[in-house]
């Protein structure tokens, strides 16, 4: 079992480096829906930059790198 998410990212980067082929980087699309939070000023601190730094077990990272294995 991996100690933390950073360790998992390091393992994934290593395995990805072993695969031949072009690497592609994909970014997720996210936004803060403020529809129900018109009067809640504390939610203004939640920026896209902050959301993109979160690494939480069970949620995909903001940035992923993929390769198609050459055959």
Image (cartoon, rainbow, N blue to C red):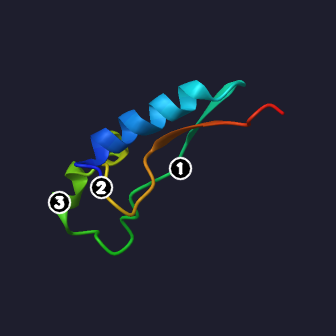
Q: Which residue is mark 3?
A: 41
The C terminus is located in which quarter? Answer: top right
Between 35 and 24, which is closer to the camera in this rendering?
A: 24
| Residue 53 appears in the figure | no
Between 16 and 62, which is closer to the camera in this rendering?
A: 16
Q: Earlier in the sequence, mark 3 or mark 1?
A: 1
Q: Which residue is mark 2?
A: 1
Whether residues under marks 2 and 3 lie with C-beta atoms below 8 angstroms apart, the answer is no
Q: What x and y, as percent, mark residue 38?
A: 28, 68
SS at mark 3 in the image: helix
Quarter-wise, where is residue 25 in the image? top right
Q: CA distance from mark 2 to mark 3?
A: 40 Å
| Residue in the picture at 56% in, 32% down | 16
| Residue in the picture at 53% in, 47% down | 28
Q: Earlier in the sequence, mark 2 or mark 3?
A: 2
The N terminus is located in which quarter? Answer: bottom left
Q: Which residue is mark 1?
A: 29
SS at mark 1 in the image: loop
């Amino acid at each position: 079992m991996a100690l933390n998410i950073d360790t998992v990212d390091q393992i994934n980067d290593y395995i990805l480096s072993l695969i031949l082929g072009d690497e592609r980087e994909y970014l997720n699309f996210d936004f803060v829906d403020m529809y129900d939070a018109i009067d809640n000023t504390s939610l203004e601190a939640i920026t896209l930059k902050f959301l993109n730094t979160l690494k939480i077990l069970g949620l995909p990272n903001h940035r992923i790198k993929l390769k198609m294995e050459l055959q």
